[in-house]
Image (cartoon, helix red, strand yellow):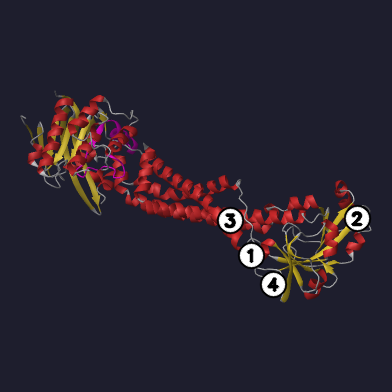
């Protein structure tokens, strides 16, 4: 399944200026993720995993180093170019779901198609995914009428509707009970296996990380260790 | 899709949306009412002047197009004018503005007036007989709740209502010329003279001849004079409308600024979500500007409807003093004004929205 380098990170640093103090969130990160891989990045709070997530997703610029996402160099990208990257290459799943509260579940998914100038119909294959996610009959509901688990499954559907090269998930089970968390992780694993969807998941939960092909551990802005798993 | 989001956003905060629309509506109504009253009052004035039945209007030097506040003409002039070629009749009136409103009282000789145009058509009562008699038109009678035999105090004098006539000729309130002249200390003086000629088609050449003889006097054919009764020829009114439009634009700007600034603050997270999933600055601007445009259009539509309310109110409360017309030509203009004010109001909130950092916006609670 794996091919070389859909995500390539070399010597990545990120320094924030907080008043007069420089905070080194990333201190030279090297990481390579192959196409079709499911990678979990684990680490304690302040380890730099969220900063890495934001940079890989083009949400925030890096300070130095080299990052290539699906062959595109992120260094020196303008805001508009990072927006284009998010539109075409990366899908997101957030801990707090981040659905638009005024839209139905269906429109929350379709708006991503609209933004990417895609045809706003669900392909038969995607209908199957909606069935797999268990939200096909909940699409006309607004987020407030959905459970946390359902909202997160809508967010996953939104994240993959445009078939992005990479799905980035930031603590996707952080707000869910263990039953819903297990269901969501199982679905993500399923999507990874069925569609070959590359997934990079940030988590501090060892149980969640166990669903990944590979676990990358971070501490103090550096990658300490990577271990492959047999699932 | 975007329209779904815009309607959903506006529907999400119905009270705020309604208040914004209402505020824009008030702005629109304010302008349309003022313009409607201006047109209505001037058109009514023109209609009443046309109803006099004269062909030429003779006015004092330096008088304004609408309104007369003095009586500088000698009452000997009508007799002199009747000696001019083609002039068949001339009648002078005196106009005294009434304090506290737009009304005025007109002094006339009822027999002369009848010779000029057949006289008033009385709905109730009859013509002026005594010096204390007053006749009023139906609208003034309705507004002041006057009946034949009622007493009304005007120009510090108690008048007895002798008749109520059908509106559309000369004035709304008339008394005997000699009585008004005496009461205001202007014996032998007139404010204006109406002239009838043997052939109305020759009115312009007669005016030209009169102008040569009566230098400095304002002499017009009736049609020429009526065509001059427009907002553009009433400088103060034109300026006043300009000021009201300016105020309305500022009101619209402030209302939309506050509404959209609050909306942007409240929707920080949603804007962050849209940006995170690839929404460009142009998309964010597009959403905010479309929402604002919708508010402005809804406000304009509601404002136009409310204008019918003010029209009804004036028709029933002050039918004689203020006449409000529906000026359809101003609907697109006032909508444009509302849209411009609203779009100006959304600029700063929109700039704030597109400058928001995505990661900060996503962590906004």
- Cβ atoms at labels 4 and 3 below 8 Å apart: no
Question: Quick check: can you spot residue B336?
Answer: yes
Residue ID for mark 4 = B150
Residue ID for mark 3 = B311
Q: Are tags 2 and 3 found on a single chain? A: yes
Residue ID for mark 1 = B143
Callout 3: chain: B
> Is B188 or B52 nearer to us in this picture?
B52
> From the viewer's perspective, is residue B75 above or below residue B242?
below
Q: Could you tell me residue A101's position as x and y percent?
A: 29, 45
- Cβ atoms at labels 4 and 1 below 8 Å apart: no
Residue B271 location, quadrant: top left
User: Marks 2/1: CA distance?
Assistant: 37 Å
Dot placed on the residue nearer the N-terminal end, 2 or 1: 2
Q: Describe residue B244's horizontal placement relative to residue A48 as left or right.
A: right
> Is A25 or A191 nearer to us in this picture?
A191
Dot placed on the residue nearer the N-terminal end, 4 or 3: 4
> From the viewer's perspective, is residue A157 above or below residue A14?
above
- Cβ atoms at labels 2 and 1 below 8 Å apart: no
Residue ID for mark 2 = B88
Which residues lie in the magenta part? Answer: A77-104
User: Marks 4/1: CA distance?
Assistant: 14 Å
């Amino acid at each position: 399944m794996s091919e070389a380098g859909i995500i390539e990170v070399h010597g990545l640093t990120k320094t924030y200026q907080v008043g007069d103090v420089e905070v080194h969130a990333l201190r030279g990160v090297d990481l390579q993720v192959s196409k079709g891989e499911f990678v979990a990045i684990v680490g304690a709070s302040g380890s730099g995993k969220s900063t890495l997530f934001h940079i890989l997703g083009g949400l925030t610029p890096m300070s130095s180093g080299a990052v290539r996402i699906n062959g595109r160099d992120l260094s020196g990208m303008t805001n508009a170019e990072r927006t284009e990257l998010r539109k075409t290459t990366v899908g997101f799943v957030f801990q707090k779901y981040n659905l638009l509260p005024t839209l139905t579940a269906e429109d929350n998914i379709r708006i991503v198609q609209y933004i990417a100038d895609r045809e706003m119909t669900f392909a038969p294959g995607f209908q199957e995914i909606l069935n797999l996610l268990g939200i096909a009959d909940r699409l006309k509901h607004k987020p407030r009428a959905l459970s946390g688990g359902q909202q997160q499954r809508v967010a996953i559907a939104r994240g993959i509707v445009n078939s992005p090269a990479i799905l980035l998930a930031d603590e996707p089970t952080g707000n869910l009970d263990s039953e819903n968390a297990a269901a969501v992780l199982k679905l993500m694993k399923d999507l990874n296996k069925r569609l070959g969807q590359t997934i990079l998941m940030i988590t501090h939960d060892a149980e969640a990380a166990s669903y990944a092909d590979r676990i990358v551990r971070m501490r103090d802005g550096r990658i300490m260790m990577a271990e492959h798993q047999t699932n | 899709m975007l329209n779904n989001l815009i309607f959903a956003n506006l529907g999400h905060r119905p009270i705020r949306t309604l208040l914004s629309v209402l505020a824009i509506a008030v702005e629109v109504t304010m302008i349309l009412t003022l313009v409607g009253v201006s047109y209505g009052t001037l058109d009514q004035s023109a209609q009443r002047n046309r109803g006099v039945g004269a062909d030429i209007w003779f006015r004092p030097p330096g008088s304004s197009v609408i309104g007369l506040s003095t009586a500088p003409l000698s009452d000997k002039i009508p007799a002199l004018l009747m000696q001019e070629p083609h002039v068949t009749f001339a009648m002078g009136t005196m106009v005294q503005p009434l304090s506290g409103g737009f009304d005025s009282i007109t002094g006339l000789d009822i027999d002369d007036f009848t010779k000029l145009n057949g006289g008033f058509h009385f709905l109730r009562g009859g013509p002026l007989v005594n010096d204390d008699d007053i006749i009023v038109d139906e609208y003034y009678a309705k507004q002041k709740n006057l009946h034949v035999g009622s007493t009304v105090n005007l120009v510090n004098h108690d008048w007895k209502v002798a008749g109520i006539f059908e509106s559309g000729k000369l004035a709304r309130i008339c008394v005997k010329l000699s009585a008004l002249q005496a009461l205001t200390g202007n014996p032998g003086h007139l404010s204006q003279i109406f002239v009838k000629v043997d052939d109305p088609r020759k009115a312009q050449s007669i005016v030209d001849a009169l102008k040569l003889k009566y230098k400095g006097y304002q002499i017009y054919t009736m049609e020429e004079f009526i065509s001059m009764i427009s907002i553009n020829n009433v400088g103060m009114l034109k300026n006043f409308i300009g000021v009201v439009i300016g105020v309305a634009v500022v009101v619209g700007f402030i209302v939309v600024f506050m509404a959209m600034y609050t909306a942007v603050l409240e929707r920080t997270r949603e804007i962050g979500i849209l940006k995170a999933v690839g929404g460009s600055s142009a998309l964010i601007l597009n959403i905010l500007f479309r929402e604002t445009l919708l508010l402005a259009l809804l406000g304009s539509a509601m404002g136009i409807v409310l204008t019918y309310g003010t029209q009804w109110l004036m028709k029933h409360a002050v039918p004689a003093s203020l006449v409000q017309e529906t000026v359809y030509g101003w609907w697109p203009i006032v909508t444009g004004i509302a849209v411009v004010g609203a779009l100006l109001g959304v600029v700063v909130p929109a700039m704030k929205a597109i400058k928001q950092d995505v990661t900060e916006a996503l962590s906004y609670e």
